[in-house]
Amino acid sequence: MILTAHQPAYLPWLGFFHKIILSDTYVILDEVQFEKSSFINRNKIKTPEGYQWLTVPVSMSGYRTKSILEMEINNSENWNLKHWNGLYRNYKKTPFFHLYSDFFEAAYKRKWTNLTDFLIYTMEFFLKELHVETKVIKQSHLHTKEKKQDLIIEICKKLNADKFVFGALGRNYAQEQTFKSNGIQIYFQDYQHPVYKQQWGEFMPYMSIVDLLFNLGPEKALEIIMKDNLDKKTLENLLNNKLL
């Protein structure tokens, strides 16, 4: 079985979904430490002036000792109205915005308190729109004890996974021999960002998934995400034949 794992992320970029698509199961790392200024609670959308950050404010008191699961949204700021207005103002004229406006307007009107709940709610919506059938499991349901690469090995063993997909940054800490000695083959994602039709000027990569969905719609989005990139069947063949 092919497994991947990643922290929950706000309005994730395309490569986030590619990694999930390559896998049989995706584990949401909700019990790892929250990282300040990361993509856990923020992402970028395109505007006529360039890109704009949308950040979900969180209560930062003691964050260095808190897991993502423990992080609460700071609702003293009117962030949800700001984010909805940002999407509406910048994407209302895109071809497919009308398909998603009701969902996002309603999502931002809800009173969210726990960050993870909000992130998983929106992520599940994106996976459904992309027709991704990868199984999703929360780390907090697995009762893990380890950290860093030992955590990944522990999760693989708990779920009987013999293959694991890392993001490109996994090369910085994952020791291939350690995984091999535990009977786990690993693959480091090498995502080639596609170019697609956007509004306003030159193409800007690394925007949120909403940029792709609003501009090209659900039927084209998955095709664009996978363009010039490894698919699951090819990855399985490469790993089974030990060509990676």
Image (cartoon, rainbow, N blue to C red):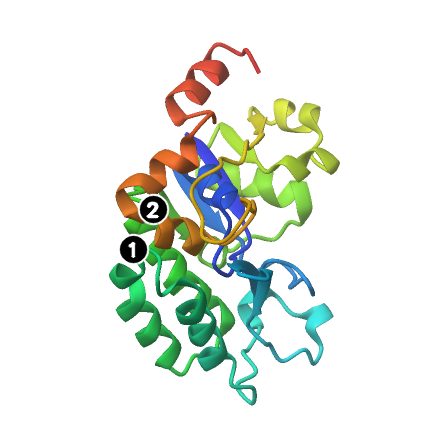
What residue is at 40 percent from the left and 26 percent from the top?
232
Give how far across and how far down residue 211 sits, in percent. Answer: 44, 53
Q: Residues within 10 Å of mark 1 (few under 14, many from 20)?
A: some
What residue is shown with label 2? 216
Residue 241 appears anywhere in the view: yes
- Badges 1 and 2: C-beta atoms under 8 Å apart? yes
What residue is at 61 percent from the left and 45 percent from the top?
151
Question: Residue 118 lies in what quarter of the image?
Answer: bottom left
Give how far across and how far down residue 14 sits, in percent. Answer: 48, 44
- Count the numbered circles shown: 2
> Is 10 situated above or below 104?
above
What residue is shown with label 1? 96
Give how far across and how far down residue 24 sits, in percent. Answer: 38, 35
What residue is at 34 percent from the left and 49 percent from the top?
127
Question: Residue 133 lies in what quarter of the image?
Answer: top left
> Is 86 situated above or below 152?
below
| The one of 206 and 139 positioned closer to us in this rendering | 206
The quadrant the N terminus occupies is: top left
> Is 6 situated above or below 63?
above
Q: Callout 2: helix, strand or loop?
A: helix
Q: Amino acid at mark 1?
A: Phe
Residue 117 appears anywhere in the view: no
Q: Residue furthest front?
A: 201
Give how far across and how far down residue 148 sits, in percent. Answer: 68, 46
| The one of 95 and 72 positioned closer to us in this rendering | 95
Q: Say which label, 1 or 2, has the lower sequence index.
A: 1
**150 sits to left or right of 201:** right
Q: Callout 1: helix, strand or loop?
A: loop
Q: Residues within 10 Å of mark 2 (few under 14, many from 20)?
A: some
> Is 228 situated above or below 67?
above
